[in-house]
Image: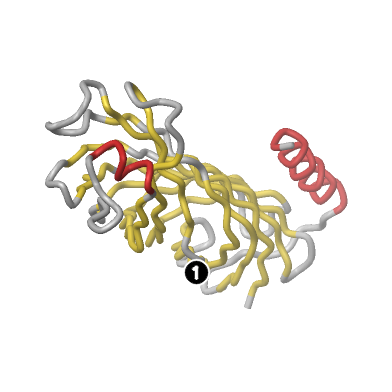
Amino acid sequence: MKAKFLTGIVAFVAALVASGGAFAQSAGSVVVYGGAVQIKPQVESGDLTAPSLAGTKVDVKKASQFSGGLTYYWTDNISIDLPIGLPFKHDVVGAGAIEGVGKLGTVKSLPITLLAQYRFGDAGSTFRPYVGAGLSYGYFFKPRATTVLSGITGGTVSNPTTLSMKSRMGTTLELGGAVNVTRDWSASLSVTKTFIKTTGSLSTGQTIETTLDPVAIKFAIGYRF
């Protein structure tokens, strides 16, 4: 299903390249865009601190959401991008020694990112590939633990185990391309990689260090003002 989705996007963008004309993305322009994003954490989990079964680790599953943002063209080739989106909801599952136990909890994430982008070609190019780099703040909130987590860590019905995840700052790299469809409308596809770690904490006093390093794929339609 994922392969068909990505193939469809590639075919759509290729058709736009074949049919589009040359329209400006020049200094002073502001593009407002909206679309969809899928975030897939590339998790490397440490071990849950004692007391716990040796090798107790976690994994964080991918999530998709609607997203938008603003891009300001500082020059014809340099732009500043501010993505704005809805929170993502991720499942946290067991891994390592507890792989297969199921869902341990859920957590919502809201990436707050600011990117500087360099766009190749000139302002009138139909297709403009670009690279970007910037900072991201991973805000994690509304964690919810399951009875599975309580069972593993000794929680009870009257005193269940709760969890939290620390918000952290990271760096983001981006590779993408934009197609001008008309003078004001455009379509874009980008991939970002964010380097970020977090610390999960349980009400039992146990902690777990986790590298998330998510990869995000974003497809958006933009309108230039």
Q: Is residue 121 left or right of residue 154?
A: right
Secondary structure at numbered mark 1: strand
- Please state the horizontal and vertical placement of residue 143, each as a whole percent of the image: 34, 57
- Please state the horizontal and vertical placement of residue 109, each as a whole percent of the image: 40, 57
Residue lying farthest right? 19
User: For the point 37% across and 47% down, which residue is it?
Assistant: 147
Q: Quadrant of the rendered structure where residue 24 is?
A: bottom right
Q: Which residue is mark 1?
A: 72
Indicate whether 87 appears above or below 131.
below
User: For the point 45% across and 67% down, which residue is it?
Assistant: 74
Q: Is residue 52 left or right of residue 14?
A: left
Image quarter in which the N terminus is found = top right
Between 48 and 34, the one nearer to me in the picture: 48
- Residue type at tag 1: Tyr
- Mark 1 neighbour density, 10 Å: few (under 14) some (14–19) many (20 or more): many
Between 218 and 28, the one nearer to me in the picture: 218
How does the figure colour the protein chain or chains? secondary structure
